[in-house]
Image: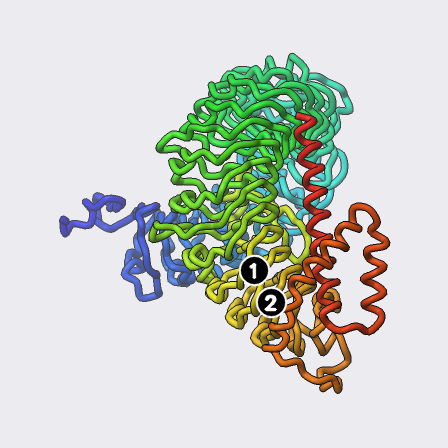
Amino acid sequence: MSRDCCSWDGVICDEMTGHVIELHLGCSNLVGTIDSNSSLFQLYHLQSLDLSGNNFCRCPISPEFGRFSNLTYLDLSWSDFSGQIPSEISYLSKLQSLSIATHSDGTKLRLGPHNFKLLLQNLTYLRELDLSFVNIPSSIPLNFSSHLTILSLAYTGLYGIIPESIFNLPVLEILYLGGNQLQGHVPKSIRNLVNLTWLDLSFNNFSGPVDVSLFSDLEHLYYLSLSYNCISLTNEKEVKSTLPESLTNLLLAACEVKELEFLRSAKQLGELDLSNNKIQGRIPDWAWSNWNFRLSTLNLSHNMLTSVDTIPLQSGYIIDLRSNFLQGSLPIPPDTTKYFFISHNNLSKEIPPSICNLTSLVMLDLGRNKLKGAIPQCLGNINRLQILDMQRNSLTGTLPMTFRTGSSLRSLNLHGNKLEGKIPRSLANCTELEVLDLGDNHLIDTFPVWLGTLPKLQVLSLRSNEFHGSIQPSMIETIFPELRIIDLSYNAFSGNLPTSLFQHLKAMKTIDPSNKEPSDEEAGYYQDSVVVVTKGLELEVERILFLYTTIDLSNNRFEAHIPSVVGDLIALRVLNLSHNRLQGHIPSSLGNLSVVESLDFSFNLLSGEIPEQLASLTSLEFLNLSHNHLRGCIPQGRQFATFENNSYKGNDGLRGFPVSKGCESSGMPETDNTTHVLDEESSSTFLGDFIQGILMGYGTGLIIGFSIAYFMLTSRNPNWLSRIYEELEHRVFMRRQKKQRGHQMHYRRRNN
């Protein structure tokens, strides 16, 4: 590298004096801090300084920046500074452009109200000011430079009324005040800003009617966003040409829009967002004609549209028609479409094979309609497809059998259809797959342990199908390394609980504090969701990958004991093993589950005492140990003080709060555990015969059957009668479930 710094990239020197006058280091991958002793502040003759887009490790902005008295251009934006913006910045009286915009990640820069006013008061030559996402808890000052062409104060916490002085800035071109707490009416004086090209007042508290004619004189305006205020868009003059023809981006989400007539003059639109409005019926032909050639982003979601037969766009990129009342056939968007959302409608025909012509598709969301017929097999061949959501339709047949090597598929959601057959082995080619939800179908298969080879799989839901057999140990050394949710409930799995599977769940063994919800920018247009049972309630959870770590193996035929290795899964939040045939003791290692919120072991054959270690689970909000053979004292204190009797019913051997007043000796002789076991074994034949007889009454005379049991139980007969009744209740419950499920399956198949 040359010793002559004037020859370096980004460095410009004065040809006469040799002084460095410009330093352009934007997006230069700089990492570190800038303290007051930095050699940077020895460049006294700087006129232009660009440090944007670097990583300065959340260090404060040094007051020494105020020493650059000749600066006309200063850009410190998006460089991970933090703390208070020093008042010394207001000393730079020659500044014409100042940008200190920051990230929206909660580590905001701050600018006090006094320093904000001081900055505007002193920087009278400013042409460009961008303080987006800087925390400025203030009303908008009155004293802006009359030279301003760009004013961006978005998401800064500003409140109150917009002062009229802003609308008297003669050369203002860009006004971005979105994401604040501004209120009042949208000022009619906005029409004075005749040079305006960009106006964004979205996500504020503006109220009242806004007539579209307000913008008709802004002939240079190409970007207008008024979304998510409390305004209602009107067209009182009923003039067809009220919007400037220059508009290319129009965002009016949640603006009480009821018709499209005001758009007749807007023929240059490339982006149109009219979501969350009250537009009814069908889209008129003249609108499609206007939008045909240029419109690439169309969002008409959450309206009351009833018909979209075709989507005649030449360059569609994002098309969102979610949450309307659309009926009939699925309209096919143009081949250029990458994101197509049409879920939450009433579409009822078959999916046409021509959907596979959309080879540019990245996201396809057809969920929550009434679509029927088979899934086009060719969908597995769209290599760019990342999201395929067809949940809650009436689709039949088998899953697509061919998924190509190199598939980009990240999320496959076919929950709640009538699909049959097996899971295709070609899914192993989808190495990017994170979410696989095949729940609530008619799939018949054994556990697909081969899915464990997918390195990024985080969610696996096979609930409410007809999977069967035991879960065999895998010969593969590492399986399911990233799995955070596994739901195998309501199937016919049998055998021991899969100890080897639990041992492989690496992601459940670590609590990662860096895991957080994706930002709105990351979430984009689509959020993964899955049905989970937590705290006794069935919920559909979005943004699931970071919030829930769940194992649900309930309502199967698993036997034997609960493996102690479950206690190693310390990131677990929900564990549901209810309605199985599990025996033995509850392992004390479950006391290691420090963040668990819901434990359900009800309707099993568990015995022994409740481990005292469970009392240390301070996050536990739901506990169900009912209908087992547990005995002894219920642990006391902490979360256990909040659980009611329903958590323990059906365990006659339990004592203590809330089952009884205390855990003192009741005067009854303690039963020797060995004798108890022998008694259980010696009476097993009679128990089976007795229950069989009672269950015969379930078919012909349930009242008689239960009357016998009631009489024997209320006659203070021995404990083994109580156990007979508990087993009887459990078996009746399971038989009812099987019978109901049989009816449901018969009904589904009859309606195919």
Asked whether the beta carbons under mark 1 and mark 2 sit within 8 Å of each other, the answer is yes
At a point 65% along the width and 49% down the height, the residue shown is 539
In-front residue for pair 42/480: 480
The answer to whether residue 214 is seen in the rendering is no
Number of marks in the image?
2
- Front-most of residues 383 and 14: 383
- Image quarter of residue 711: bottom right
Left or right of 161? Residue 37 is left
Mark 1 neighbour density, 10 Å: few (under 14) some (14–19) many (20 or more): many
Q: Which mark is residue 152?
A: none
Q: Is 105 above or below relative to 173? A: below
Single out the residue that lies furthest toward the left: 2
Q: Position of residue 509 (x, y in %)?
A: 45, 61
Label 1: element kind: loop
Q: Which residue is mark 1?
A: 573
Q: Is residue 264 left or right of residue 438?
A: right
Secondary element at tag 2: loop
Which residue is depicted at the point 35% across and 65% down? Answer: 36
550 lies above or below 442: below
Give the amino acid at mark 1.
Answer: Arg
**Placement of 563 over or under 335, stated as above or below:** below
**Is residue 747 something one can see in this rendering?**
yes
Q: How is the image coloured?
A: rainbow
Q: Residue at x 47, y 26 (%)?
A: 379
Q: Label 2, on which residue?
A: 619
* Residue drawn at (57%, 15%) of the image: 312
Return the disc, 1 or 2, that comes first in the chain's sequence: 1
Give neighbour class at mark 2: few <14, some 14-19, many 20+ (Cα, 10 Å): some
